[in-house]
Image (cartoon, rainbow, N blue to C red):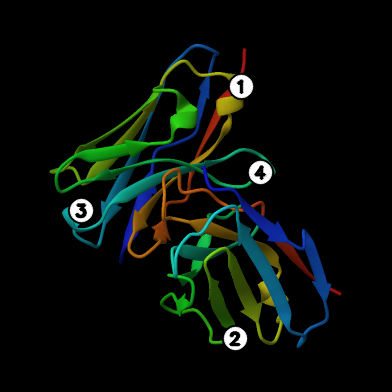
Amino acid sequence: EIVLTQSPGTLSLSPGERATLSCRASQSVGKNYIAWYQQKPGQAPRLLIHTASSRATGIPDRFSGSGSGTDFTLTIARLEPEDVAVYYCQQFITPPYSFGGGTRVEIK
Amino acid sequence: QEQLMQSGAEVKKPGASVRLSCTISGFSFTSYPLHWMRQAPGQRPEWVGLIVPANGETGYSRSLQGRATITRDTPATTAFLELRGLTSEDTAIYFCARWFGAADLWGPGTPVIVSS
């Protein structure tokens, strides 16, 4: 099973700052078999990025994804209050399609 | 409007079975795989399995040790997840999701509580 490790565990930033979230895989997931989700309390996860770098429908362009192989990054260019949430990465190159442990983003 | 609707909360005793449903609307049932995920309180989501409604092909996480079965009723545009031999570790919210490049559309989730 591929293990995904996300860092940092918690990110506390001021509005307008840049947030950089990391997702590292225990083995290669290829060029783009990674997705990123945002989850707010009491809600289902919401797809932000698919195939490592493609924004899902309706996602603001301040969200971007990059990376390949074992190292992937989600960047929120200018943090807004509504971005407070937990962010998860998921690999889908090999079942089980595992998730990372999440990064909690807070506003200072 | 594209959406997935899930059945209501379940409370079960250890050793029992549960059958959850996921009914889609607003898009073609046979055009996309449907995945099931679960999320225990305060934990990361866990992938459970999938079904390809067009042909009934399924795949499962080995962590469930053969206790899960995913089926579908195509005329009813509904997928089902049955989980047998429940233990307290199966307590979680169970989500179904459409797969198009990733899990791009999620149901609201069904809480399942396993308690004696």
Q: Count neighbours of disc 2 (C-alpha within 10 A) and say few if under 14, some if 14 to 19, many if 20 or more.
A: few
Q: Secondary structure at mark 2?
A: loop
Q: Which residue is mark 2?
A: A62
Residue behind mark 4: B43
Checking the image for residue A31, the label placed there is none
Q: CA distance from mark 2 to mark 3?
A: 33 Å
- Residue shown at the point (45%, 79%) measured from the top left: A58
The x and y percentages for residue A70 are: 57, 63
Residue B7, picture quadrant: top left
Chain at tag 1:
B
For the residue marked with disc 2, what is the amino acid? Arg
Q: CA gap, disc 3 to disc 4?
A: 30 Å
Q: Secondary structure at mark 4?
A: loop
What residue is disc 3 on? B29
Tell me the crowding category of disc 4: few under 14, some 14 to 19, or many 20 or more residues within 10 angstroms, Cα based.
few
Q: CA distance from mark 3 to mark 1?
A: 33 Å
Q: Chain of mark 4?
A: B
Real-space CA distance between mark 4 and mark 1, rounded to the nearest whole angstrom: 14 Å
Work out how far the residue at label 2 is from the one at label 4, CA to CA, in angstroms: 27 Å
Q: Report whether mark 2 lies on the same chain as mark 4.
A: no
Q: Looking at the picture, tell me which residue is in the foreground, A59 or A54.
A: A54
Residue at point 52% right, 48% down? Answer: A98
Q: Earlier in the sequence, mark 4 or mark 1?
A: 4
Image coordinates for residue A63, horizontal then vertical, percent: 58, 80
Q: Are marks 3 and 4 on the same chain?
A: yes
* Circle nearer the N terminus (3, 1): 3
Residue A85 sits in quarter: bottom right
Q: What amino acid type should be assigned to the residue bearing mark 3?
A: Phe
x, y percent for residue A78 = 69, 87
Q: Is residue A2 left or right of residue B66?
A: right
